[in-house]
Amino acid sequence: MMSRTLASKIANRGKINKIGVVGMGYVGIPSAALFASSPRFEMVYGFQRASATSGYKIDMLNSGTSPLKGEEPGLEDLIRRVVDAGKFRCTSDFSKIAHLDAVTLAIQTPFLNPKDLIPDFSALFAGIHEVGKYISEGGLVVLESTVTPGTTTGIAREILEKESGMKAGIDFALAHAPERVMVGRLLRNIQEHDRIVGGIDEASTKRASELYAPVLTTGKIIPMTATAAEVTKTAENTFRDLQIAAVNELALYCEAMGINVYDVREGIASLKEEGVTRGILWPGAGVGGHCLTKDTYHLERGVKVRGGELDYPAGKDSLFVLARNINDFMPRHMFTLTEQALVRAGKKVKGSRIALLGWAFIANSDDARNTPSEIFRDLAIEAGATVEVHDPWVGSYPGVPIRSDLISALRKADAVVIFTGHEIYRNLKAAEVKKFCGITHPVIVDGRNVVDPDVFISSGFVYKGIGRGDKNQHMIAGL
Ligand code: SAJ
């Protein structure tokens, strides 16, 4: 039964006109731009703390420029359009929230220590405190960040009520509507993916649905409770991570059995029939990013936070955490393959020069959050190698010099190790790479199946590839 009180306060406010988006990142920027481009809404404010690390975004956005590098089709134009139209403004003045009908929060929720399931909600809570200080009666607050199930109806609600002196579900609406974006297709994902909308009560779900409906093109609203929405989001990423772990384990088996995992994958993927899908994903050098690397732990923690009785095989690890461990193992496996290949070339890791191609966690993007490349680089340096990192998109990274010039990264390399599937690496020419390495039997280790092993092998390379058991023990040409 809808609580009259909240519904009437929302009705008094009328339609949502003015919106705030807290957190100008990969989620907040495209969301704010789409809200602002909708004729349904009058004005959108993007809220960004004027911090040393991210404060620069405020002026950039207000000059109509996107701070996000990497290919983001349509985003730059859209930002320019809504800024020129005076419908979007970025600010660090959170007091403006007092005049807004709805505020969304899209702030990172990393884990401090996955082992003990301790998340770092400090940035998110700081944002929620700011919103709580200024949210007004009949207003709507939506968490878009991925959070531990139980957070919206629990700690988030408590902070908002304490700061505002009002009651969620009575004086203001509160919901969780998780982001489902991927870098490289941010705008499309927001418009085309169905939107999970989970209110703490019906009135909140209804109000949040009113907020998102205008920016959806093919996507539709899927209403549910706030906690079900939190589980949906954490579980969909956990399932993806599990699928990737399954094909990574298969790749390791194929290497041991001397066969090509990509043949097997094609075979498995060919089984198609009504209701029978074998959604097998792609093996590779590891799983990075801000989502799959942590959402399993949010789901695991949710079971603890919600405190229900869990009936589970005694002493057995969580399948989901095991999947995390397998995917975290892949960069280590890349190191083992590199070590083995150098030995085949009569060398050791110690004293060798390694060209690490790809620092971003995903192809054709500048996003290097939790990149698997870092685990490999640390192992190689620890073992006494010199590592030159190249990436066409990632400009800089704390403590890691990144070259944008491929030739200088390849120069005098004993081994070339591919970690990211950037388009540029799909066009590597064996003869050219060999020329820059300047040796007879350079090593190449392919973590994304982007090069043709036969071409490189016949050019004298010592080749290793994830899942390429059919090639990893090849005869070395010219030896
Ligand atoms: N990866 C593989 N094999 C694959 C797919 C991905 O090794 O077959 C690796 C990628 O190289 C990357 C990592 O996994 O290092 C993550 O890749 P991703 O394609 O999952 O990209 P994300 O993490 O940006 O996007 C995921 C998506 N979640 C799902 O599809 C369930 C996206 O829809 C979410 O919005 C996003 O997480 C998020 O923000 O939660």
Image (cartoon, helix red, strand yellow):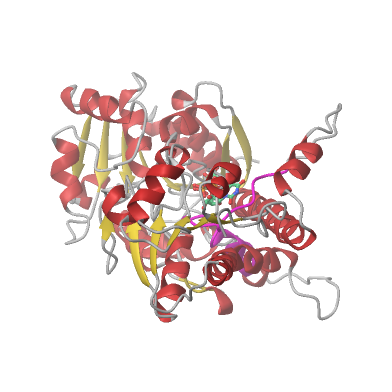
Quarter of the image for residue 413 reads bottom left
412 above or below 366? Answer: below
Main SS type for the magenta part? Answer: loop
Q: Could one spot residue 104 in this view of the protein?
A: no
Residue occupying the point 18% across, 51% down: 92
What quarter of the picture does the C terminus occupy?
bottom right
410 sits to left or right of 192: left
Q: How many marks?
A: 0
**Residue 318 x, y percent position in the rendering:** 73, 69
**Residue 20 x, y percent position in the rendering:** 31, 41
Give 4 or 400, whichever is nearer the viewer.
400
Residue 232 in the magenta stretch? The answer is no
Q: Could one spot residue 82 in this view of the protein?
A: yes
Highlighted magenta segment, given as a residue range: 280-302
What quarter of the picture does the N terminus occupy?
top right
**Residue 317 x, y percent position in the rendering:** 75, 74
Give 354 or 390, whichever is nearer the viewer.
354
317 above or below 62? Answer: below
The residue furthest top is 39
Residue occupying the point 53% across, 27% down: 192
Residue 294 in the magenta stretch? The answer is yes
Give 203 or 81, whichever is nearer the viewer.
81
Residue occupying the point 46% across, 58% down: 442
Give 325 or 103, whichever is nearer the viewer.
325
Quarter of the image for residue 153 reads bottom right
298 sits to left or right of 25: right
**Residue 136 x, y percent position in the rendering:** 32, 47
